[in-house]
Amino acid sequence: MTLLAGVRKGARGVVWYLKGILGEDAYEKYVAHHAALHAAGADDGTDGAAPHPLMTEREFWRDQTDRQDANPQGRCC
């Protein structure tokens, strides 16, 4: 591994870590969770339909903001 490749790998790790801390990866986690629920439903004899349709990223963040406003918790902003 070259020095430049090592630096890139380290930088990607730092970016991944910061996104997790700041919650920027929340939509990706939501999509993965939704897909897991959808796949689990396919094995239980139902048609595999998810309980609700997958939200777009814009709808997801609007919902997150609305929930945080309705139920404020300790946060920086």
Image (tube, helix red, strand yellow):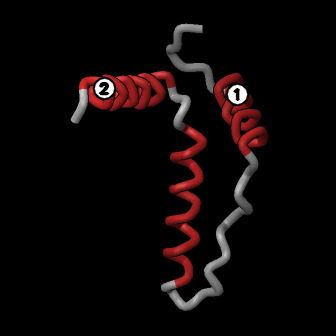
| Label 1: how many Cα within 10 Å (few below 14, some 14–19, many 20+) | few
Front residue of 59 and 72 = 59
Screen quadrant of the N terminus = top left
Q: Earlier in the sequence, mark 2 or mark 1?
A: 2
Residue drawn 60% across the image and 87% down it:
46
**Quarter occupied by the C terminus:** top right
Residue type pointed to by label 1: Thr
SS for callout 1 = helix
Position above or below: 39 against 45: above
| Residue type beneath disc 2 | Gly
Q: Give yes or no for contact between labels 2 and 1 (Cβ–Cβ under 8 Å).
A: no
Above/below status of 63 relative to 37 = above
Q: Which residue is mark 2?
A: 10
- From the viewer's perspective, is 36 left or right of 8? right
Badge 2: how crowded within 10 Å, few (<14), some, or many (20+)? Answer: few
Q: Position of residue 44 (x, y in %)?
A: 50, 86
Percent coordinates x, y for residue 39 in the rendering: 53, 74
Q: Position of residue 37 (x, y in %)?
A: 53, 67
Identify which residue is drawn at 49% across, 22% down: 22
Q: Secondary structure at mark 2?
A: helix
- Which residue is farthest left? 1
Say which residue appears at 74% left-offset and 62% top-offset: 53
Q: How many marks?
A: 2
Q: Which residue is mark 1?
A: 65
Residue sitting at x 77%, y 42%: 59
State left or right for residue 68 relative to residue 41.
right
x then y, percent, for residue 63 = 73, 37
Q: Which circle, 2 or 1, is nearer the viewer?
A: 2
- For the view shown, which residue lies furthest in the bottom direction? 45
